[in-house]
Amino acid sequence: MSVFDDLVGQEQASAVLSRAAHAAAEAVAGGRGAGMTHAWLFTGPPGSGREDAARAFAAALMCPSGGCGHCDQCHQVLIGSHPDLEAVKPEGLSYSVKQTRELILRAAGAPTQGRWRVILFENADRVTESAANALLKAIEEPPPRTVWLLCSPAPDDMIITIRSRCRVVSLVTPSGEAVAHVLATRDGVPWEMATFAARASQGDLARARLLASDEGVRRRRDAVLAIPRSLSGVGECIAAAERLVKTAEEEAAAATTLLNESETTDLRRLYGEGSTGKGLNRGLVRGGAGALRELEDRQKSRATRVKRDSLDGALLELVSYYRDVLAMQLGATVELANDDHRFELDSIAKGSTAEETLRRIDVIMQCRERLAANVNPQIAVEAMMLGLRRP
């Protein structure tokens, strides 16, 4: 058994990381450690498991046996409680230079258990330009036992100076069969549901687990896939855009409301609200109001990110829908991601041309670009719906 056994469909990357972990152990013992480096960049499409691969590698670096998967070191890394692991996940739209500098200071500390100090930076592509420059200096001159594990969808998402100083680990999208096997054998999902979820998620294991376990997620998917056949007029396009944006807002509120309340309560308590006793008042002490404003700004940014991610997921569902339409129009012998909607797919495929389908896919991708550029979601999605409208 090994921590790399849980990486679905990543045999080549697992072999590279396993060799590097053994080289790291050699370096700890005073050897050369050829094959180990201080900065790694994990890249791959959604669902490839970038963060899972980086965490498995972190466990292998900490483990005396190179990632056995069952010792205390491996267990602590995998559940996120290891004292020498700093896991960072930008929750807002970006990761600021202030946050990056604070992270660099924490990364400079020596490992407490004598092996490595590991910084696992999820969504590292969200750093701002100034934050990327600060990060570059830390990667150029790292402490001797600090290892940076950066995760990004593609190498080009990181500035070239950072990319050139990292060893790139390229992950691939797992096959539908591999994902279905994991759902059936590890999660106990019935085989029929496992194959449906694997096909519909297009190899994204996390998405497949949601589809297999949450009926609400399946209903939202069906609602998104019902959009193309509903766009018969301008009014229907505007209504569909409003529903899509409203659903994303509701999902963002559901995902963040309780967390926001908990964070705000904890911060107010930290700054003395409700304290009693001689010399104390029941309000916030000095500095509390400013800290509260900073927290509110971070919470708004996080809500915007969750809303944008929800919208982007819906747009990718639409891309997969029109990709299936295009496959049917061209007679391609590929598995349809949305085979459970074959009747609707066939109807649209017969009622349009491949050129029209490609144009619609371009319209969706343009909407994604606009949302990434902070265009008002309602306006961007309305423009997309009008572009998808059937003539």
Image (tube, rainbow, N blue to C red):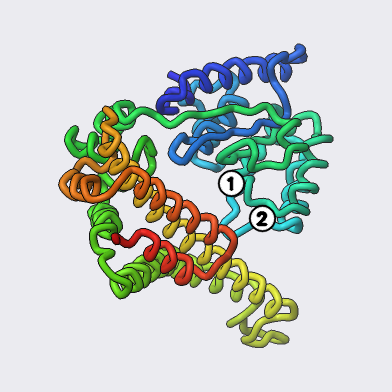
Between 180 and 38, the one lying in front of the other is 180
- Label 1: which residue? 123
35 with respect to 331 (left or right): right
The part of the image, by quadrant, that contains residue 155 is top right
Q: Name the residue at 33% across, 31% down.
A: 179
On residue 303, the disc is: none
When the figure is inspected, residue 273 is found, relative to residue 361, above or below; the finding is below
Residue 141 picture location, percent across and down: 84, 35
The part of the image, by quadrant, that contains residue 40 is top right
383 with respect to 66 (left or right): left
Q: Name the residue at 40% across, 29% down.
A: 174
Residue 39 picture location, percent across and down: 71, 31
Please report whichever mark, 1 or 2, sits nearer to the chain's N-terminal start. 2
Helix, strand or loop under label 1? loop
Pointer 1 with pointer 2, Cβ within 8 A: yes
- Label 2: which residue? 95
Between 161 and 351, the one lying in front of the other is 351
Residue type marked 2: Tyr
297 with respect to 230 (left or right): right
